[in-house]
Amino acid sequence: MKKKDFQDFVRTILSAPVDGLDWNGKLAVIQNEAFKMDKEFNDDPFKKGQPWTDDELRLVLSMPATTDSICLLAKALGRGHGSIEQIFRWAGQSPSRIDAERSDDKFIQQIVKIRKELGWRSIGGNT
């Protein structure tokens, strides 16, 4: 399929009426599916399993925890989407939960150190 044919196909799909969805709803479905496919195509990131540097964590935690940021960071850092999501999740957990569940985890403690530097606040529950 040529690029022009693909563009026409996308326009046709977006122009089609969808029960219960307005324009913004259709765009949300497209973005969600694009995110899922981006995760599928990034199934073997080149830095998988390698330790994270403090600078990489600073970059991740300086960005908003959105699907757009996750996709961008995964490509830029050669990491999996899930690992970036995990950083955001642990950065928001309460100190008591981290102490209870991962007090001896070097990676989680590295995230805690960087989140303190950046002024992150705990948003997670205690359990």
Image (cartoon, rainbow, N blue to C red):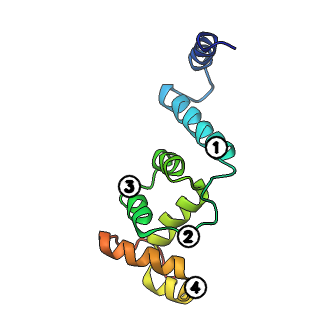
Of discs 4 and 2, which sits in the foreground? 2
Looking at the image, residue 41 lies above or below residue 48 = above
Q: Tell me if label 4 and label 2 are in contact, CB under 8 Å.
A: no
> In terms of secondary structure, where does tag 4 sit?
helix
- Cα separation, mark 3 vs mark 2, equals 20 Å
Of discs 2 and 1, which sits in the foreground? 2
> In terms of secondary structure, where does tag 3 sit?
loop
Identify which residue is drawn at 34% across, 70% down.
120
- Cα separation, mark 4 vs mark 2, equals 20 Å
Identify which residue is drawn at 49% across, 82% down.
126
> In terms of secondary structure, where does tag 2 sit?
loop
Disc on res. 63:
3
Earlier sequence position, callout 2 versus callout 1: 1
- Cα separation, mark 4 vs mark 3, equals 26 Å
Residue 115 is situated, as x and y percent measured from the top left of the image, at 37, 72
Disc on res. 51:
2
Earlier sequence position, callout 3 versus callout 1: 1
Residue placed most toward the observer, 56 or 114: 56
Q: On the rendered image, what quadrant is the C terminus found in?
A: bottom right
Of discs 3 and 2, which sits in the foreground? 2
Of discs 4 and 3, which sits in the foreground? 3
Residue type for callout 1: Lys
Side of 71 relative to 38 (left or right): left
The residue pinned by badge 1 equals 36
Residue type for callout 4: Glu
- Cα separation, mark 1 vs mark 4, equals 29 Å
Looking at the image, residue 12 lies above or below residue 104 = above
Disc on res. 101:
4
